[in-house]
Image (spheres, rainbow, N blue to C red):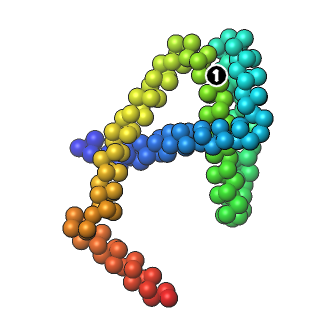
């Protein structure tokens, strides 16, 4: 009974987690593209050489520190939000999010091997990979049902869904 009540919360958390993972996966090529545009490739090589000389604990600092300056940018976004500058706030927060994930992916790529030398970090890393697999297992059937419903002829759609689509179409046509 309790499990059934918590199911929507777990699905929501899984979706949020997968969005973060999706951003991580899809921003990495964008960061690589930027690295190719500006001399970040040389910086990445320089950083990798420096990380090789560090202890795993010091490497953790190298991984965490670059994301810290982005915190004030998120605060600016919240300030804009509280002062009802909606579009600027959303753009700032989304920009900070993308930049943060992109920077973290870039730095993690350089520091990953050294960080995984720490047992607790490796355990945490494996735990997060396991969470990602569980989140995918939880959300994949829902995504499949949505894809089937969107691709289908409507025969499997509930009458409520069809009424919502009909109402939406009607409101669009009335607006013209």
Q: In this view, does 151 lie to the left or right of 67?
A: left
Task: Mark 1: give few (<14), some (14-19) or many (20+) Cα within 10 Å.
Answer: many
Q: Where is residue 67 in the image (x, y as percent from the top left)?
A: 69, 35
Residue closest to the eye, 36 or 57: 36
Residue 24's quadrant in the figure? top right
Q: Is residue 153 visible?
A: yes
Position of residue 108 relative to residue 32, above or below, is above
Q: In this view, does 174 lie above or below 169?
A: below
Q: Position of residue 113 (x, y in %)?
A: 58, 18
Up/down of 84 relative to 139, above or below: below
To which residue does mark 1 refer? Answer: 111
Which image quadrant is residue 13 in?
A: top left
At x 61%, y 34%, the residue is: 105
- Given the current orientation, which residue lies at the most extreme front position? 36
Q: Can residue 71 be seen in this view?
A: no
**121 relative position to 79: left or right:** left
Residue 131 position within the rendered picture, expressed as x and y whole percent measured from the top left: 41, 32
Residue occupying image coordinates x 66% and y 41%: 33
């Amino acid at each position: 009974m309790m499990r059934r009540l918590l199911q929507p919360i777990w699905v929501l958390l899984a979706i949020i987690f997968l969005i973060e993972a999706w951003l991580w996966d899809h921003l990495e090529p964008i960061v690589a593209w930027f690295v190719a545009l500006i001399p970040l490739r040389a910086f990445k090589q320089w950083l990798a050489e420096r990380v090789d000389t560090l202890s795993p604990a010091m490497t953790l600092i190298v991984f965490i520190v670059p994301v810290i300056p982005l915190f004030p940018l998120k605060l600016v976004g919240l300030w804009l939000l509280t002062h009802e500058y909606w579009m600027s706030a959303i753009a700032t927060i989304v920009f900070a999010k993308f930049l943060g994930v992109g920077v973290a992916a870039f730095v993690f790529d350089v520091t990953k091997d050294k960080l995984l030398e720490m047992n607790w970090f490796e355990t945490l890393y494996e735990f997060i990979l396991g969470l990602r697999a569980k989140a995918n297992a939880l959300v994949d059937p829902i995504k499949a049902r949505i894809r089937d419903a969107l691709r289908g002829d409507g025969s499997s759609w509930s009458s409520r869904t069809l009424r919502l689509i009909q109402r939406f179409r009607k409101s669009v046509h009335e607006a013209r």
